[in-house]
Amino acid sequence: MAKKKETVKNMPAKKNSTKKKTIRRAWTASDVRELKSLAKKKSGVSRISKALKRTVGAIAVKAHQLGVSLDTRG
């Protein structure tokens, strides 16, 4: 006789409660001004992202769109 696989029907679905919901914010003129200012001072991308409360990726994309260099090698 072959064994039947047991299926669990009343088990609750797993929820990933550690991931935050992404809230998108438009770039304001003051955000762009501060990004350019910090990039000119050769601040690191992580420092700029913390100052503007945005992700490193968002900072890199916006800098590229504006033609601003984030090169900090000196």
Image: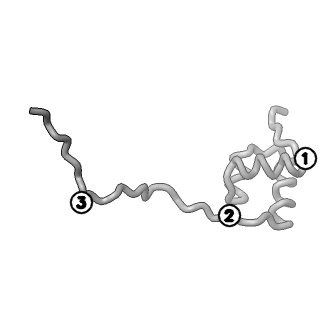
Which is more toward the observer, 64 or 38?
A: 64
Q: Residue furthest right?
A: 67
Compared across the picture, whether 73 is left or right of 3 comes to: right
Under mark 2, the amino acid is Arg
Q: In the picture shown, does residue 73 fall above or below 36? A: above
Spot occupied by residue 17 in the image (x, y as percentages of width and height)? 43, 58
- Residue located 82% across and 55% down the image: 35
Residue at label 2?
24
Compared across the picture, whether 3 is left or right of 31 comes to: left
Under mark 3, the amino acid is Asn
**Alpha carbon of mark 2 to alpha carbon of mark 1: how far?**
22 Å
The quadrant of the picture occupied by the N terminus is: top left
Mark linked to residue 67: 1
Q: Secondary structure at mark 2?
A: loop
- Residue located 87% across and 53% down the image: 36
Q: Mark 3 or 1 closer to N-term? A: 3
**Alpha carbon of mark 3 to alpha carbon of mark 1: how far?**
55 Å
Neighbourhood count class around disc 3 (C-alpha, 10 Å): few under 14, some 14–19, many 20 upward = few
The quadrant of the picture occupied by the C terminus is: top right
Spot occupied by residue 21 in the image (x, y as percentages of width and height)? 55, 62
Residue at label 3?
10
Q: Are marks 3 and 1 in contact (CB under 8 Å)?
A: no
Q: Are marks 2 and 3 in contact (CB under 8 Å)?
A: no
Which image quarter: residue 22?
Answer: bottom right
Which image quarter: residue 44?
Answer: top right
Spot occupied by residue 9 in the image (x, y as percentages of width and height)? 24, 56
Compared across the picture, whether 29 is left or right of 20 comes to: right
Q: Mark 2 or 3 closer to N-term? A: 3
Q: Are marks 2 and 1 in contact (CB under 8 Å)?
A: no
